[in-house]
């Protein structure tokens, strides 16, 4: 089931990226899951949701952040945390890696201990 969920999310994200969009908030909390069927392993359908932070990329394949909205620190790539103007497809790939962690661990623990600790470590590098 986990692999199926991740495959469907990766296809959805590939579609977004092919159309020059970035999601910027890919996380388990933004994945809708639907079970269909009555067998032992019912088919699963997932959809990526919450496009409030999604943006269209410029010709260079980047997005320049214009406002000071809060950033989901635990799911954001180090490059985007260091420089809020640096958002591209790779930022979503980082978030997908964190999503894999969330799904494999069944979200028992949040990724990283504390958002402020993550920021301090990133700014040290």
Image (tube, grey):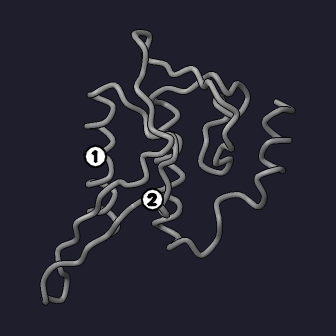
In the image, 5: left or right of 55? left
Q: Residue at x 44, y 40 (%)?
A: 23
In the image, 9: left or right of 74? left
Tell me: residue 51, above or below residue 68: below
Quickly name the residue at label 1: 12
> Picture coordinates of residue 5 (x, y %)?
31, 62
Give the SS element for disc 2: helix
CA neighbours of label 1 inside 10 A, class few (<14), some (14 to 19), many (20+): some
> Picture coordinates of residue 42 (x, y %)?
18, 80
The Cα–Cα distance between marks 1 and 2, rounded to whole angstroms, is 13 Å
> Picture coordinates of residue 118 (x, y %)?
77, 47
> Picture coordinates of residue 117 (x, y %)?
83, 50
Looking at the image, which is closer to me, 42 or 62? 62
Q: Residue at x 55, y 71 (%)?
A: 107
The earlier-in-sequence mark between 1 and 2 is 1
Residue found farthest to the top = 59
Looking at the image, which is closer to me, 114 or 56? 56
The reply to whether dot 1 and dot 2 touch (C-beta < 8 Å) is: no
Quickly name the residue at label 2: 30
């Amino acid at each position: 089931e986990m692999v199926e969920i991740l495959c469907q999310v990766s296809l959805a994200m590939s579609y977004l990226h092919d159309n020059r969009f970035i999601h910027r908030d890919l996380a388990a909390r933004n994945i809708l899951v639907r079970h269909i069927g009555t067998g032992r392993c019912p088919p699963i359908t997932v959809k990526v949701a919450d496009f409030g932070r999604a943006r269209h990329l410029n010709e260079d394949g980047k997005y320049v952040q214009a406002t000071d909205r809060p950033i989901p620190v635990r799911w954001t790539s180090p490059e985007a945390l260091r420089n809020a103007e640096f958002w591209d497809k790779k930022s979503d790939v980082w978030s997908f890696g964190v999503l894999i962690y969330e799904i494999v661990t069944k979200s028992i623990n949040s990724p990283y201990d504390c958002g402020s600790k993550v920021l301090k470590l990133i700014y040290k590098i």
